[in-house]
Amino acid sequence: CASYEFQCTSGHCISGSSRCDSDYNCMDSSDEDGCKCFTNELTCSSGRCVPSINLCDGVKDCEQGLDELRCGELISSGGCIKSQFSCPDGTCVPWSSTCN
C-alpha cells in the first residue's frame, strides 16, 4: 500500500481516511479494529466498534457474539440499554445525566 493508504488484514489497500470512520471498508472489517468507539457504539473485546443499530440484529458482529447478548435489556428504538436515554443524534446517556 502507499503511505497514505491503510492495508487491510486481507492485504487489500483502502484510503487512509477510511480508517476508524465507523464504516467497514475492508471486507474483513479490519479498518475498524482497534479504533476508539463513539458513545453510541459497543466495543467488542477485540476493540472493534459496533454501531448501536447493529445490536441484537441476529448477526454476530463481535467475534464472541457480545453484540447479541443481553438483548432483552435493549430498547428497540435507539439501541440504548434501559438505564440510558437515546438522544436524537443516536448517542446513549445515563438517565441520571439527562437534566444537567
Image (spheres, rainbow, N blue to C red):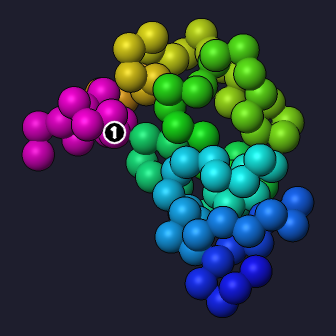
The foreground one among 27 and 67 is 27
Residue 25 place in picture, x, y as percent: 64, 52
Quadrant position of residue 40: top left
Magenta range is: 86-100
Indicate left or right for 49 with 94 as reference.
right
Residue 56 visible, this angle: yes
Give the residue drawn at x 59%, y 25%.
55
How many numbered discs, if any? 1
Residue 47 visible, this angle: no
Other-residue count near label 1 (Cα within 10 Å), few / some / many at <14 / 14–19 / ≥20: some
Residue 21 place in picture, x, y as percent: 50, 58
Indicate left or right for 96 with 61 as reference.
left
Give the residue drawn at x 30%, y 27%.
86
The foreground one among 68 and 4 is 4
**Compared to 3, does 62 lie above or below?**
above
The foreground one among 31 and 89 is 31
Whether residue 66 appears in magenta in the rendering, the answer is: no
Instruction: Give amino acid for label 1.
Output: Thr
Give the residue drawn at x 45%, y 11%.
76
Quadrant position of residue 72: top right
Residue 12 place in picture, x, y as percent: 80, 63
Give the residue drawn at x 18%, y 36%.
98
The foreground one among 95 and 15 is 15
The residue indicated by pointer 1 is 91
**Compared to 28, does 18 lie above or below?**
below
**Compared to 65, does 43 lie above or below?**
below
**In the image as oriented, which residue stretches furthest toward the left?**
100
Query: Which element is circle 1 on?
Result: loop
Please state, as top left, top right, bottom left or bottom right, where the N terminus lies in the image: bottom right
Indicate left or right for 75 with 7 as reference.
left
